[in-house]
Image (cartoon, rainbow, N blue to C red):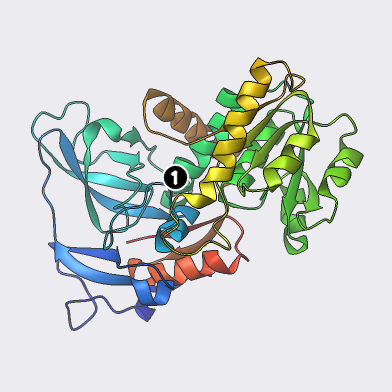
Amino acid sequence: MSLDSAEYPAPGTADGTPRADANVLVRMTGSGEPEERIHTAEGTRPTAGKGRVLLEVEAAGVSYAEVQMLQHLHPFPPKFPFVPGYDLVGRIVEVGPGVTGWKIGDRVAAMPRQGAWQRFVELPAKTLAAVPEGLDAAVAVALVTNGVTAYQMLHRLTRLQPGRPVLVHGASGGVGALLTQLAVHHGLRVIGTASPAKHDTVRELGAVPLDYRTPDIVAAVRELAPEGVQAVFDHIGGRGLDAGWTMLARGGTLVSFDSSVAGYRPGQWFRPHVPALRRTVVRFFARLLGLTRGRRMSMYYVKPGPDFNTDYAELCRLAADGVLNPRIAGRHPLRGAAAAVRALLDGSSVGKHVLTP
């Protein structure tokens, strides 16, 4: 669902237009429902400090990280109230003292993990990656956290040879859809789980769809890949990681890159992530003892740095060449942030929701 900004009058002005020097921002004030805990406010435009730049945001991503934060179930929970927003694309409007390599007008991407849901954001210059002119802002921001996560899991963590079968859970989601496209482009045979309503989308991406609610999903995967899959990419965690481990072929890799928070009480911030951590440690030592048939399990967490910038540049190239087509589930104004999170919670979205200040 894409929402028009006219539905959400801007704070602080009679006609709904923010002041030129105003910093419209979104605050998350506590655990609960998005409509009750996500609010728009107007603040002072920041200035760029030493080694930092000020960006005017073109697009900011909405992700399950914000859902986890809203329920106080994120592994690194910020203190309420705070401005959410894991990733963004924007243009530099002010350069602080000591900054080299960037200038006013440059288009950049960043992954601050929080703080992106506002009109102006001040960030360290060293955390920025270049964004090509002409690339749609929503597409560009979809490639930041989601895209780099997918690319690095495939090309830096597993490094599979073309022709091998892999399983992608949530193949129609923000990360899953990009991972599926990258894997197909690399020549891998992809099995993608999704709800039946999204199976046509999974087929369009080049994968074989499989209902994630299949009672014996291990047997279903084995029918499609009798010798097992070379990689399982899991964003759910919990007991599903045991099924994923069973699906692996000799020498295969199980990658856990997120954890479902369903069923946990708000405030149990680390508990959803313990099952994946425990299984990773146990299987690491089992592998050292030669008990895993060469299989391994790894937890993945995207982080900025030189590899991030290199991989993001490659993703932008693939998008410009038409190899990647990031699905944009909805474009929302900042004042529609709560509705964007609600749409994500409803589970019917295909692709990424984006805020466009």
| Residue 14 % position (x, y) | 18, 83
Q: Nearer the viewer, residue 244 or 95?
A: 244
Which residue in the protein does label 1 denote? 140
Q: Amino acid at mark 1?
A: Ala
User: Relative to residue 341, is residue 350 drawn left or right?
Assistant: right
Q: Is residue 155 above or below residue 84?
A: above
Q: Is residue 201 left or right of residue 72?
A: right
The picture places residue 221, in percent across and down from the top left corner, at: 84, 42
In the image shown, does 187 or 158 lie closer to the viewer? Answer: 158
Residue ID at (27%, 45%): 91
Q: Nearer the viewer, residue 320 or 78?
A: 78
Q: Name the residue: 87% across, 46% down.
A: 220
Examine the rendering and report whether any part of residue 154 can be seen. yes
Q: Is residue 114 left or right of residue 42?
A: right
Q: Is residue 200 positioned above or below 322 on the image?
A: below
Where is residue 185 drawn, in percent x and y?
Answer: 68, 32
Could one spot residue 159 in this view of the protein? no
Q: Secondary structure at mark 1?
A: helix
The total number of labels drawn is 1
Q: Where does the C terminus fall, quadrant-wise?
A: bottom left
Q: Position of residue 224 (x, y in %)?
A: 88, 39
